Amino acid sequence: MPMRVPTTAVLLLLIAPAIACQTDPAAQTVAKSAEALARTKAPDPPAASNSTPAVTEAHAAEAVAKSRTLFFYTSPRSTVEMAVHSIPETDQQRLARLRDNFRAADCDGNRMQEQPISRKGGENGTNLICTWPGATRGTIVIVAHYEHEGKGQGALADWSGAVLLPFLYEAIQGQPRENSYVFLEAWKRVGAETWLKSLPKAERRNIRAVIDLDALGLGTPRFYTTFSPFENAPPGSAHLQMQLLWAAVDDGLTQAPEQTSTRHWLSVDDTDPFRAETIPSIVIHSVPPESERVPGSADDVAAAVNGNAYFQTYHLICAYLASLDRVAAKLDTHDRMWDASGPIDVQPESETPRVTFRNIYGGRLGVAPPK
């Protein structure tokens, strides 16, 4: 993927639809900033110089540290589509498949943990957690629930987000990360809450952002952050939305993710316990208003997952996670990089990381080597 600096025309094309459906206070902040982003000008390239400074190891290390280019790995579309369209029947079979996929993505040893869960009434389940360590104490949590409830196969509402997590775990290995990434395969409604409560308070405070994946592949990617008219989302939630828009630009999408409410179809809200502790959270899904009845219904089968839309969403989320690594510590702050409507010298294009990908071959996650 070639490097590119977002232009005014591209930003207007991508962000305008998202602005039209912002309704909550945090979303208004995004709309205001996004409008200003479209007016910003990319910095001019540095003037040519006749002198070439000596390149030392120290200079090279500093250049890498300051680089705005962030990398992620990506798997072939055929592998990703095969995984989402192959749906185990029972919760135990789903958990076993996810466990195998994570191990294929190099999550093993103490990086993989299983957390037993007991519900009232004698029902038992398991959380599966894979962690990719970072250089700082900051943590980015990616969560999905894997159990099958409702009619149909649960391809959208239960499986499409869960099966993507091992691919995303593999994707972030494209380069060393500043933040640790926790991939949580949560069991039912109590899964995410149980895991969060099991953490010491200091570790909870280190959670920079939570991304919940559910009902992917029904159409183009969408998002939502506020679940109650009485809920005041933290500033970081608006910044999560803005960063998703920037990731869409950098990933070359021609249609911006739209804010679309999940309240009519979302049966398990994995972000709820995190939002209760004012941790910036976002749900990424693909359910347009006219298709709200599909998740969890008899039509929720493998054929409902559009392979092209699913892979496009996968690629966007890879770019999103890579870009969040550089800005996560600033999500809940009033850093100038978020104030695009401020001084004229504020240029988000120069603050926001660029992302690009490296292909994976060699058999990982079932990927066949190129012939």
Image: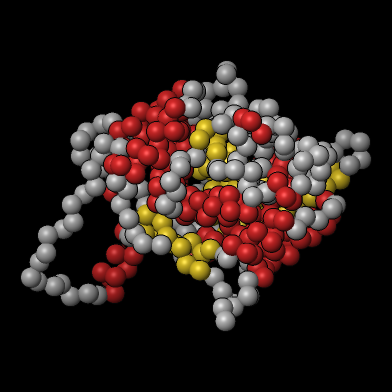
Which image quarter: residue 31? Answer: top left
Furthest-right residue in view?
122
Name the residue located 40 percent from the left edge and 37 percent from the top edge.
15
Name the residue located 56 percent from the left edge and 22 percent from the top edge.
231
From the top left corner, tell me how far across and down residue 84 is, in percent: 69, 55
Name the residue located 26 percent from the left edge and 36 percent from the top edge.
39
From the top left corner, tell me how far across and down residue 227 is, in percent: 60, 26
- In terms of depth relative to the viewer, which is nearer, 236 or 315? 315
- In terms of depth relative to the viewer, which is nearer, 4 or 272? 4
- In terms of depth relative to the viewer, which is nearer, 262 or 110? 262
Which quadrant does the N terminus fall into?
A: bottom left
Furthest-left residue in view?
50
Residue 186 appears in the figure: no
Furthest-bottom residue in view?
371
From the top left corner, tell me how far across and down residue 51 is, in percent: 9, 71
Horizontal side of 227 relative to 84 (left or right) equals left
Horizontal side of 156 relative to 350 (left or right) equals right
- In terms of depth relative to the viewer, which is nearer, 122 or 281? 281
Which quadrant does the C terminus fall into?
A: bottom right
